[in-house]
Amino acid sequence: MRVSFIIGYGVPKFSILLRPHGSCYLCRPMCSSSTSALTTSQKPRTSLFLRPPTHSATLSDLQKWQNWAKNLASSVGSTFVDLDNGPDSTLLRRELKWLVEDVTEDGSISAEQQRNIRLRVSLEELYKLWKQRIEERRPFQYIVGCEHWRDLVLCVEEGVLIPRPETEKLVDLVADVVSDNQGLREGLWADMGTGTGAIAIGIGMILRSYGRIIATDLSPLAVGVATFNVQRHGLQDVIEIRQGSWFEPLKDVEGKLAGIVSNPPYIPSDHISGLQAEVGRHEPKMALDGGVNGMNDLLHLCKGAASMLKPGGFLAFETNGEKQCKHLVEYMETNAGGIFCDVNLVPDFAGVHRFVTAFHK
């Protein structure tokens, strides 16, 4: 059981995630992809746990680094918590343990190891990475290059939003509606602003060979990361990645979508500066900033969904909380021309209304 610090905004500080160990990591061989994004995407960095152990260090040198890293983590105390609700020393030491698991061939540093220990990065790089985590507040997920989300291990890259555990609910919502609706289960879905591809992959695991998904993102880097993750999970025949802004890459499927899901930018612009350092300094502003009241992209998606969904189609959007949820529901019920029905507010795992769902009439 992995207890991970989730650098979020208005979400719980700690979340429980499953972390596979050693041979449990998903290591599917890479294969060619049918996605249309390969010519425009940027190739992502390889996550630490996927790199070959081509480096080595003596046990004493590695223990010296580990003691230095523990002392650096301990020196933080509650400073980051007091500053911006960041990680404390206890969590940082836990992250250090996970870093050791990812960079060592055997997943640990043991006194019984009398030989050089094989590493996936150099010892010099380890010092650099941990200094970045503490001194620059670089997110741990960017340090190791992956995040554990649902039962997936997703590669992540600085410049692409780190998937949060509360977003897993979007996949659950889709699972519920397709369970007894063949038309939705076998239809074409869209994940708007896919980032790492987390939502699309989660839904792809449910639809499998029955339906298809088009996942879009404006960022070439996000397209590259999502393409890589789709290939690793063997879903390239189910999920197509397209680059572009919101509905622009979907003109050929207007009125044909069975469902639309999205976790769009929804942080009000003047709240960005007050986010945790891990978020505000390092995660892409384009994936966070939703305009003056955080509603710009949510309303744009809602308006576009009216023409993109087929009759009976389903939508599910994540928001910043109850105020935005109510605003979106009010728009759907009073300003959308009566196109939507069964509009609902759905709470997240903490009981906060965070999601809005609806059907196209």
Image (tube, rainbow, N blue to C red):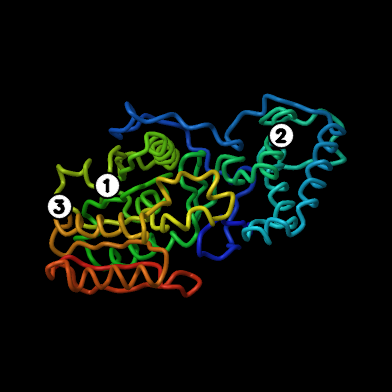
* Image quadrant containing the N terminus: bottom right
Relative to residue 273, is residue 239 drawn left or right?
left
Q: Are marks 2 and 3 in contact (CB under 8 Å)?
A: no
Amino acid type assigned to the residue bearing label 2 in the image: Leu
* Image quadrant containing the C terminus: bottom left
- Tell me the residue that label 3 is attached to: 256
Amino acid type assigned to the residue bearing label 1 in the image: Trp
Q: What distance separates the C-alpha of mark 3 from that of mark 1?
A: 16 Å
Is 177 in front, or is 242? 242
- Tell me the residue that label 1 is attached to: 246
Q: Which residue is located at x 27 percent, y 50 percent?
A: 190
Amino acid type assigned to the residue bearing label 3 in the image: Lys
- Tell me the residue that label 2 is attached to: 126
Tell me which label, 2 or 1, sits earlier in the chain: 2
Q: Tag 2: Cα neighbours inside 10 Å, few (<14), some, or many (≥20)?
A: many
Marks 2 and 1: which is nearer the front?
1
Q: What distance separates the C-alpha of mark 2 from that of mark 3?
A: 49 Å
Q: Which residue is located at x 41 percent, y 58 percent?
A: 268
Circle 1 sits in a helix, a strand or a loop, which is it? Answer: loop
